[in-house]
Amino acid sequence: MIIDCHGHYTTAPRALQEFRDRQLAALDRPSRRPVPATLKISDDEIRHSIETAQLKLQRERGTDLTIFSPRASGMAHHQGDPQMSLAWSQVCNDLIHRACTLFPENFVGVCQLPQSPGASPAECIGELERCVSELGFIGCNLNPDPSGGHWKDPPLTDRWWYPLYEKMVELDVPAMVHVSASCNANFHATGAHYLNADTTAFMQFLTSDLFRDFPTLRFIIPHGGGAVPYHWGRYRGLAQDMKRPPLGELLLGNVFFDTCVYHQPGIDLLTKVIPADNILFASEMVGAVRGVDPDTGHYYDDTRRYIEASPSLSAQDKRKVYEGNARRVFPRLRSRQQATKNGV
Amino acid sequence: MIIDCHGHYTTAPRALQEFRDRQLAALDRPSRRPVPATLKISDDEIRHSIETAQLKLQRERGTDLTIFSPRASGMAHHQGDPQMSLAWSQVCNDLIHRACTLFPENFVGVCQLPQSPGASPAECIGELERCVSELGFIGCNLNPDPSGGHWKDPPLTDRWWYPLYEKMVELDVPAMVHVSASCNANFHATGAHYLNADTTAFMQFLTSDLFRDFPTLRFIIPHGGGAVPYHWGRYRGLAQDMKRPPLGELLLGNVFFDTCVYHQPGIDLLTKVIPADNILFASEMVGAVRGVDPDTGHYYDDTRRYIEASPSLSAQDKRKVYEGNARRVFPRLRSRQQATKNGV
């Protein structure tokens, strides 16, 4: 079985964005904000939007199950206020739930959190709990910079975030560290802000004792870990200079990398440098890069081909990357699939 | 000949930092700021600080010439005001000049610019011109984020920067894109801010027509290009999706990467993915990572060993990486060396 741990609903019916536009247009007039019931999307529209995109690509590429969440750049936590972020998150998460219910064999949900710049992460607990306990979601996306490129909130290792971590540990769900759109002209979203956030989060973890406080807390750093595996020697050396424990001991029990790296040399480096136990298969399709690489004739984001060709992974390693690690990092996957099997 | 294009004077005598401390202590009382003449550092102190560090390592590692600039994290453009930044830059650059004059065979200068958040880059022209025309410097370090981790100034591709670029083109000097210390708690300087800035600058270049406006402008992106070579497929794909020209055509005539990547797999990736014409040898010693890698028994930043062992580089490629590219990117190196030979 091949589990893709990183897929966003980037092809949602247009009505979703129209709802968001109406919401933002009423930013200064809360009484005129649209209520969720005004968002009308039929099951057929959802089916069509997925069958022609993510599901089609799953079949073509021979992957089985996508861990599916709302569009990352659409979260836009920097826009609006906490109330608006909550309403928007609920709408987006409900739509993910409908998609996963329509295709229970192919998609399982991960939620958007109702973050907002300066608002306590504790405000996200209710929606996380609803998504996990009521909608059967198995994880969340956590934005380390709700300000959208201004980096105004405390680092992920600050106690500011602890109430949310306590709930994650209680529910036994991991978070993918994933920023959203950038409203800072310096940072292109998918070409800079995303990768910078990945690198930044890793270094925050490296310099903290977060995992002593939360030994079972788990994070996936997407996009192949940003710059981290390419600079693994730098990180080993920095940890050593700071008298920190070796990286394996310090954080590899809690931090995992996905495989959203869109060329063979990148995946070769990732799989050579990072232990196979810490790599989760992912493509982020349909996502940041949509074209076909003229050098290979295949989609840039068809990452399964790179994994297959990696010289560092044994057959057993590949099983871990494709399935075993995802089951370990997302333990609720098991009960979710059991429920699906039983028609719940 | 082996030219190391990225070395900072991280071992400067303590009096330099004491001068800076006095400067910052008088931030609100400009009349009490220290004058440069109060900074007393003897030639012997400079000699000692370099002979026991950078020069010793040059000899041990078999490299010949370091392109030498003030300590990057010491620039701290976010502190003080433009006048203070100018005085501080002059002091730091003068010290580099003295070091290069004491060891003319081993070091050649690159200057710190007197940037300040919100101040026009045009304000840096005078100091750049002084360093190049009077002190024989061959390039500059350009901070893409003078705000120190808040990223408040415009992207490097904005016309805001053009007056400085015009002067760089006129003087025929390149810039290394190099941030300084971070005053944003989210960003560890050498573990996140530096690499993020490298990645950010590359994506700014990718999305702009800067090099159509300045066909001979040249930038070195340090630290192996941040996350860029590891995500080369992503960048090729993003450029393609945006209908930009292929990366080679778009920016590889103007953008170069150094080899400050501190493990063999990272250098192997860099040298496989990036054309040999665009890679400049560098170690950043004595710099961000100072320890010995227990896995190899050698210093992490002894990057020559990785270049030697790279399977992608022919003997001719290595000559380019070690020397030829640096001479092409820093054309003033030639006249500087001629002057040194003639005892000027």
Image: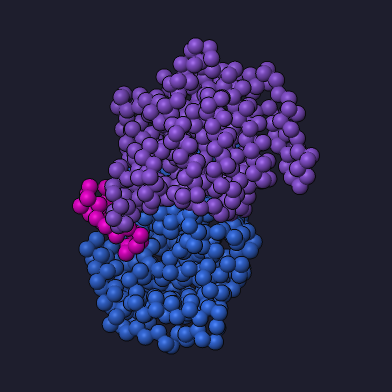
Chain colours: A purple, B blue
Please identify the residue farthest to the left as the structure is shown.
Answer: B297
User: Where in the figure is residue B189, as x and y percent of width and height?
Assistant: 43, 59
| Residue B304 part of the magenta segment | yes
The single residue placed furthest to the top in the displayed view is A342
Q: Residue at x 54, y 43 (%)?
A: A122
Q: Please tell me which residue is depicted at 67% across the width and 46% down the height of the picture.
A: A81
- The answer to whether A117 is drawn above or below residue B97 in the figure is above
Q: Main secondary structure of the magenta part?
A: loop
Locate residue B319 relative to residue B215 in the image: left or right: left
The reply, left or right, for residue A112 in relation to residue A20 is left
Q: Nearer the viewer, residue A120 or A247?
A: A120
Residue depicted at 30% across the width and 42% down the height: A248
Q: Which residues are magenta?
A: B283-310
Assess whether residue B128 is covered by the magenta stretch.
no
| Front residue of this view, candidates A98 and A230 | A98
- Residue A152 shows in this picture: yes
- Where residue B136 appears, as percent x and y from the top left, is 43, 76
Viewer can see residue B94? no
- Residue at coordinates 30% horizontally, 52% vertically from top-left? A244
Image-quadrant location for residue A267: top left
Q: How many marks?
A: 0
Seen from the viewer's position, the closer of residues A22 and A118 is A118
Residue A263 horizontal side relative to residue A83, left or right: left
Quadrant that contains the N terminus of chain A: top left
Residue A136: image location, x then y, percent: 53, 24
Q: Position of residue B226 (x, y in %)?
A: 44, 51
Which quarter of the picture shows residue B265? top left
Q: Nearer the viewer, residue A165 or B331?
A: A165
